[in-house]
Amino acid sequence: MTIKADLFAPLAVEAELRTQYGALCWRDGKEGLEVLLITSRETGRWVIPKGWPIKNLPPEHSAAREAWEEAGVEGRADPHCLGLYSYDKALGKLPGPRASVPCLVAVYPLKVDALANRFPEAGQRKRKWFSPRKAARKVAEPELQALLAHLPRHLAEPPTAA
């Protein structure tokens, strides 16, 4: 299944959602397919690299840039969106009261070629490889859990025309 993320931009504005692009970083590991999760800087929970759209970059390249900045990922981003998930992004710094904004994340698969030791957010996050099933148990968002759990099938399916 292919989802064109640009179609959701008007929906996000009407519903006061914010759009982000995420990279589902994967590799063929020694024991099969593996996905890379990173910790969030504020809470330390397991997440995928994601961030705001970057002007003049297509969604998958924005996702790849976030994967580089947050996890040191070098690889190839696929232009076919795997799916969407939603979450509430906390704004502001801990400690103290924090507002939040609802976000809709379009997720793009990114085949990892290498992990750099030096990258912009090195030292601010942990990164770890998991099987898709274990990764699904580590993340909090139900839609992301489903994407991770079904990742082997998604990667095996040829993309359909949008």
Image (tube, grey):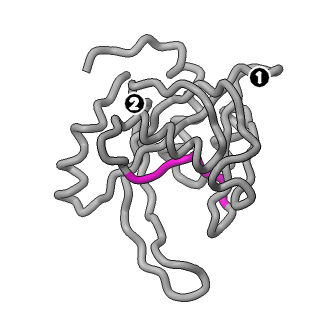
- The tag on residue 107 is none
Please name whichever residue, 134 or 67, is drawn nearer the observer in this view of the structure: 67
| Looking at the image, residue 84 lies above or below residue 30 | below
Which residue is at 43% across, 35% downward?
61
| Looking at the image, residue 11 lies above or below residue 131 | below
Quadrant location, the C terminus: top left
| Residue 19 in the figure: left or right of residue 27 | left
Please name whichever residue, 60 or 1, is drawn nearer the observer in this view of the structure: 60
Please say whether residue 32 is one of the residues in the magenta stretch: no
Residue farthest along the bottom direction in this orientation: 96
Q: Position of residue 94 (x, y in %)?
A: 59, 81
Q: Position of residue 62 (x, y in %)?
A: 42, 41
The answer to which of marks 1 and 2 sits earlier in the sequence is 1
Which residue is at 74% across, 37% downward?
130
Q: Amino acid at mark 2?
A: Cys
Residue farthest along the right direction in this orientation: 30
Magenta span covers which residues? 45-52
Q: Which picture quadrant has residue 99?
A: bottom left
- The tag on residue 29 is 1
Q: Position of residue 22 (x, y in %)?
A: 48, 43
Residue picked out by circle 2: 81
| Looking at the image, residue 41 lies above or below residue 69 | below
Which residue is at 45% across, 38% downward?
107
| Residue 120 in the figure: left or right of residue 102 | right
